[in-house]
Image: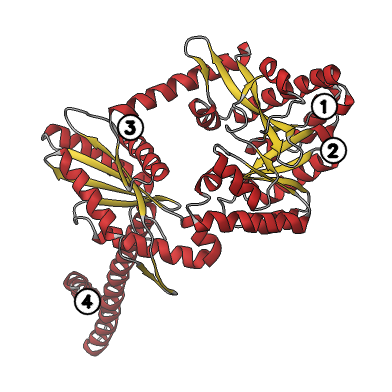
Amino acid sequence: MILPAALGLLVTVGLSSWVRRAGAGLLDVDVVVLVVGFAVTVVMTATVALQRLFSRQTHAHLRAMEHRASHDELTGLLARDELRARLDVALRSAYRHDRVVGVLFLDLDGFKAINDSMGHEAGDALLRAFGARLRSSVRSEDLVARFGGDEFVVVTLGLERESAVREVAENVRREFERPVEIIDGEILMTPSIGVSIGSRVSPGGPDDLLASADQAMYRAKKLRLGVEVFDDRQRREVLDRREVERALVPALADGQFQVFYQSIVSESRGRTVGLEGLVRWQHPVHGILGPDRFLAVAEEAGLLARLGEVVMREAVAQTSVWNHLYGPANHTQVGVNLAERQLVDPSFADRVAEILAWAGVMPRQLDLEVGEELLLRRVDDSNRVLHRLAELGCRIVIDDFGIAHGAFSRIRDLDLVGAVKIDRSIIRDLGQDNVARAVVEATVSMANALDIEVIAEGVETAEQRRLVVDLGIDLMQGFLFQYPVPADEYERLLGEHVLS
């Protein structure tokens, strides 16, 4: 404030000199000078003060905007893009100084079910609590980010050996063996953790390390490992996936995909009552490839709907052949799986009608199988398509039933489902897990109330067959009865009694 006051003084002196030269009296001069000088000083001081205030507010606003852009609003952790940028800098430094950088990719186990049952507010509270616990479980210099949804990333900095990264991951996992506190109480929330490591010996860019850690996390979740480190075997899997992705489009154009068939059998009738069409890839180099080798890649590449339509067209055409060979009395009911893009495509029902008309097959012979988790997504869009398919005369079957939360009420509200197929993982655990038995009992009770059929998938042993029948299920599918086979091998099974 000294500078504005000094400037005010100079103005006062200059004004006094000018007024005296103009012939004003001494008293008048002093009064005018004092008033004007004081006013100038006040105005200039206020102006500078306001400028400084506005400057501080502007800087504070800019800092707040930068923080919002670089940090997750819910948890206060780093945001995805900011983490990627800082990871890039960290990797360059580590490679120069022969240090290692670890990337930990975390996904909360069972978060969707908790979020659905407790509500989004509780889910947000859990994410905030998880983020805070995660931040406190690593060193202050390590980077912690929320990557999106219930996915989090930790980047460890300045470590000298790769084993230290694994130690950090194990420490983080142990931190979540204690319940997390939220508003409504405590809840145990464990993460699946995938780890990738960048070093001078095994360098990689930010996207490479994040993708590798992500893949390791999925493996940890699938196999319930807790922590999984990306290794050479998984690196080969990545290369295989890239090879598959490059080959998918030419394979579709060349007609390399074919349909294998597996029976659905009835215990009470002692024979095959339907079948499911399952896609296989007749690879020119590797031979017959199962769906586990290419379906996930096809989905990521946006090709699953196209592949699904190929399977449907072949299965319907084959059904037409069997109709002519075995006559109307032995019409076969065949099921095919739907992809999400088909289920939300308004024109899909029209294409199904065209395929059935082209092959001369009745709609009631076609089962359209929708995965349980898929049924719970895009509800409004899928409702319209499913109703059109049901109006067409096709039977809607819910596949992989019993592994997601909320499907019971969805089936009741939808009121067009003809059958549910209990997931093979639940059938596998029957006799060993009371929860699995409870799921089957609840499913059978619901099906009886809604007058829909129940099919047990993945029946592989005589004991599983006995348990399924004891729980009131008549229809079964699995290796105990028949492995999936090509159409020409399946023909000899049609009409045969496959139960002993």
In this rendering, the label closer to the viewer, 4 or 2: 2
User: Mark 4 falls on what kind of element?
Assistant: helix
At label 4, the amino acid type is Thr
Residue at numbered disc 4:
12
Residue at numbered disc 3:
208
Q: Quadrant of the N terminus?
A: bottom left
| Label at residue 356 | 1
In contact (CB < 8 Å): disc 4 and disc 2: no
Q: In front here: 360 or 271?
A: 271
In this rendering, the label closer to the viewer, 3 or 2: 2
Q: Which x, y percent locates residue 107?
A: 39, 50
At label 3, the amino acid type is Asp
Among the two numbered marks 4 and 3 on one chain, the one whose residue lies closer to the N terminus: 4
Residue at numbered disc 2:
392
At label 1, the amino acid type is Leu
Among the two numbered marks 4 and 2 on one chain, the one whose residue lies closer to the N terminus: 4
Q: Residues within 10 Å of mark 3 (few under 14, many from 20)?
A: few
In this rendering, the label closer to the viewer, 1 or 4: 1
Q: In front here: 231 or 271?
A: 271
Task: Identify the residue at image location x=65%, y=48%.
Answer: 469
